[in-house]
Amino acid sequence: MANTLIPIEERILTPNEVARLDRRRRRGQLFLVICFQTLIISCLLLLWSGQDATYSPGWHRPMVFWNAITFTLSAFFGITGISLRRGSNEFFSY
């Protein structure tokens, strides 16, 4: 009996295509893990960047820039991870 949880287009894949699909989904899971880690770091940096934005003179606000970079990286890895994980209906455990 066919596994109905697998999409129709994935039921006729060759073993090499299945391995490539698994690698893509694992990379997507890795990117989601990196997304959540950078999001946690961004939330912690938010404490220092608020103080830096308030008390730093002129345009020299390094913590604000680092916070913007980590939020941008978090968004990038989140969007990329979700797109690479598409079609997966299982939970990966490392």
Image (tube, grey):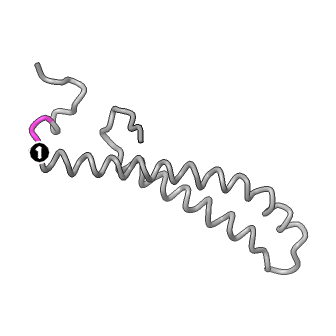
Q: Residue at x 13, y 23 (%)?
A: 2
Q: State yes or no: residue 13 in magenta.
A: yes
Vertical arrangement, residue 37 with respect to residue 1, above or below: below
Report x, y in % for residue 61: 78, 74
Q: Quadrant of the N terminus?
A: top left
Name the outermost residue toward the top. 1
Q: Position of residue 29 (x, y in %)?
A: 41, 46
In the rendered view, does 80 fall on the left or right side of 46? left
**Picture quarter with the C terminus:** top left
How many neighbours does mark 1 have within 10 angstroms: few (below 14), some (14-19), or many (20 or more)?
Answer: few
Residue positioned 58% across, 62% down in the render: 72
Residue drawn at point x = 67 percent, y = 56 percent: 42
Residue at the image position 56 percent from the left and 56 percent from the top: 74
Q: Helix, strand or loop at disc 1? A: helix
Write down the quadrant of residue 67 in the picture: bottom right
Q: Nearer the viewer, residue 94 or 10?
A: 94
Q: Is residue 27 left or right of residue 17?
A: right
| Residue type (three-letter) at the residue carrying disc 1 | Pro
Q: Main secondary structure of the magenta part?
A: loop
- Which residue does the numbered mark 1 point to in the structure image? 15
User: Position of 17 compared to 29: left or right?
Assistant: left
Asked if residue 25 is positioned above or below residue 60 in the image, the reply reads above
Residue 5 image point, x, y percent:
25, 26
Which residue of the protein is positioned furthest toward the right in this rendering? 55
How far from the left and from the top, in percent, is residue 88?
Answer: 32, 37
Q: Is residue 30 left or right of residue 36?
A: left
Q: How many marks?
A: 1
Magenta highlight on residue 56: no
Residue lying at the far front in this picture: please name it. 94
- Magenta residues span 11-15
